[in-house]
Image (cartoon, helix red, strand yellow):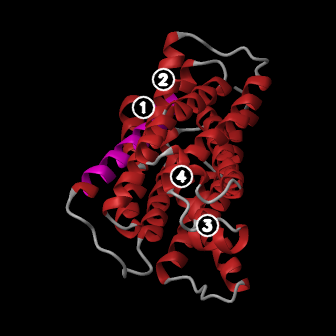
Amino acid sequence: MTNEKKHNWLLYALITMLTWGVWMTFSDPTLGALYLGIPTEFPSEMVYVVWALSMIPCAIFALINIKWKLDVRPKTVALSMGVGLLGAGGQLVLFLALKYAPSYLVMPMISVAPIVTVLLSATFLKEKVSKLGILGIVLAFVAIICFAVPSDTEGEGAQGWIWILLAAVVFICWGIQAFVMKLANNNTPDAESVFVYMAIAAVVLIPVAFLLKSPAELSACGWAAPTKVFFVQILNAIGAFTLVYANRYGKAMVIAPLADACSPVICCLLSIVLLAIAGLDAIPTFWQIGGMVAAISCVFIFSRE
């Protein structure tokens, strides 16, 4: 591996941060409605369906990139499908968790999922980083925790305790996913095959979403809404595609917290600007400012790692 490729992981990670940051911004019901005209009542389960379908164009691009020579060895298929099922399964369980508790309770619990990735990578992959890199990981977690602190604790409370169990499932799924993604990349000669199987896994779980909401509800808001949601969700797919490349060339224990820490920075900054343009209150909280400083600092540190 050339020195240039060794450092490509940061470029791919930065693309993931950018696309996921914009995706998070317009996934917000308020901003989605204000700037894209997406109805706030568009079912979250149907968002999953559109998200899964948005993986297909990127998967086709991946296949073209490897001249349709998909790695079909059983181990590659198993690991790559595992990555996809963990990610997509976590999405579906998250939608269920949000039925029992508000996002300000659920999201903080699952936001530190990279700690699972860090522990697994250090234990089984024997990944190591310098003392400066350890500082970067710590700062990434500081940023994640800062952004997880709710800015407004008003709203509906949780219903029972089942949401805790569901959020824990998402936490574990997404933490393990990044670790398995690294394993899959280590086993296959190309990152594209990993992503293609991730896309297949996402599409395979669409019927599960239809069990939660009927297919007719996909068109309940008209076909314009799903189309607009598609262009938002494809940003997530592009970010997932470049994340696979980042994991191929970089360390999972660095990339997972970095991506999760810095995407909210872009989302926060963009949201502040767009809300201000719309004449709405857009003052960042103390915790958001702290999270921005920590995340930007960890990007600088990892650029030197």
Q: Which residue is mark 1?
A: 126
Distance of label 1 from label 3 (alpha carbons) = 47 Å
Nearer to us of marks 4 and 2 is 4
Under mark 4, the amino acid is Glu
Q: Is residue 240 left or right of residue 67?
A: left
Q: Which residues are magenta?
A: 164-182
Q: Which residue is mark 4?
A: 217
Q: Amino acid at mark 1?
A: Lys
Q: Which residue is mark 2?
A: 79
Answer whether residue 224 is visible to the viewer in this image.
Answer: yes
Task: Kindly report which numbered mark, 1 or 2, lies closer to the viewer in this rendering.
Answer: 2
Whichever of callouts 1 and 2 sits on the residue coming sooner in the sequence is 2
Q: Is residue 197 placed above or below 20 in the rendered structure?
A: above
Question: In this rendering, would 69 be left or right of 146?
Answer: right
* 283 versus 193 height, above or below: below
Residue at x 70% of width, y 50% of height: 15
Q: Which mark is residue 39?
A: 3
The answer to whether residue 180 is above or below residue 134 is above
Q: CA distance from mark 1 to mark 4?
A: 47 Å
Residue type of the residue flagged with mark 2: Leu
Task: Give the x, y percent position of residue 56.
Answer: 68, 34
Image quarter in which the N terminus is found:
top right
Q: Is residue 45 magenta?
A: no
First of labels 1, 4 by sequence position: 1
Question: Circle 4 sits in a helix, a strand or a loop, which is it?
Answer: helix
